Amino acid sequence: MMKPPRKSGTRLINVSTLLKGLYVGVVVSAGAIYLAFHVWGSGGWVLGQSNVSDAVVYARGTTIVMAGIMMGQLGNLFSARTSLSSAFRLSPFRNRWIFLGILAQFAIMAAIIYIPFLQPLFGTAPLLPLDLLFLLLLAPAALLLEELRKMLTRKLSRASRASL
C-alpha cells in the first residue's frame, strides 16, 4: 500500500517473473530430485533402469520430490513478499496469516505422508528424519537464492544510476 498502483498496461507476469520462477524452481527441484535419486539408489536402482523394484522405496523417492517442492515454495513465500528490497527487512509477523498457512501446509503434508490410509491415495511413503532434515534446507536455500538475486539487482541498479 506504500507504493503507487501499477500502470494499467503493466503485465502481472512478465519475463523477469518467469525467469525468477524458472531458476528458483530448477534449484529446488534439482535438490529434491537429487535426494530422490539417492533414495532410489539405496534401494538398488541405477540410472538407466526403467523402474525401482521396491514399491516403498519408489514411493519414498516421489514423496521426497513432492515435499521438496512444498518446502521450496515456503522459502519462495518469504522472498516474494517484496520484489526488490530484502525480505529480511520485513517483519515476519507483518502478516499473521502467513504462519497459520505454514502450519496448515505442514499439517497437510504430514497427513499425506504419515497417515497410513492416505498413503495409497497419494502414493506416498513415510520419510526418514534425515530426509526431512535435507528437505528443511530447501526453504532457506530458495529464500537465500532469491535474496542474492535481489541484492545483485539493487547493486546493478545503483551502478547504472551512478553512471548516468
Image (tube, rainbow, N blue to C red):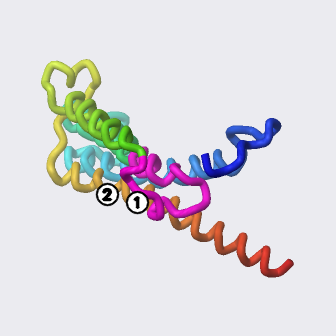
Q: Residue 52 versus residue 132: which sits nearer the camera?
A: 132
- In the rendered image, residue 66, in percent from the top left (x then y), is placed at 35, 37
Say if 112 sits above or below 83 in the image. Answer: above
Residue 78 part of the magenta-drawn span: yes
Q: Amino acid at mark 1?
A: Ala
Residue beneath disc 2: 137
Q: Residue at x 37, y 35 (%)?
A: 50
Q: Residue at x 27, y 38 (%)?
A: 103
Q: Can residue 115 be seen here?
A: yes
Q: Amino acid at mark 2?
A: Leu
Say if 121 sits above or below 140 in the image. Answer: above
Determine the CA span between mark 1 and mark 2: 6 Å
Q: Residue at x 39, y 46 (%)?
A: 74
Q: Residue 1 versus residue 89: which sits nearer the camera?
A: 1
> Pointer 1 and pointer 2: residues touching (CB < 8 Å)?
yes
How busy is the neighbourhood of tag 1: few (under 14 within 10 Å), some, or many (20 plus)?
Answer: some
Instruction: Describe residue 54's horizontal placement relative to residue 164 as left or right.
Output: left
Say if 162 sits above or below 121 in the image. Answer: below
State the quadrant of the C terminus.
bottom right
Residue 37 part of the magenta-drawn span: no
Residue beneath disc 1: 141
Residue ranking furthest to the right: 164
Secondary structure at badge 1 equals helix
- In the rendered image, residue 138, in percent from the top left (x then y), is placed at 36, 54
Instruction: Describe residue 20's horizontal placement relative to residue 68 as left or right.
Output: right
Secondary structure at badge 2 equals loop
State the quadrant of the N terminus.
top right
Q: Can residue 48 be seen here?
A: no
- In the rendered image, residue 143, in percent from the top left (x then y), is placed at 44, 57
Residue 111, disc = none
How busy is the neighbourhood of tag 2: few (under 14 within 10 Å), some, or many (20 plus)?
Answer: some
Query: Where are the magenta residues, as a range?
Result: 72-94
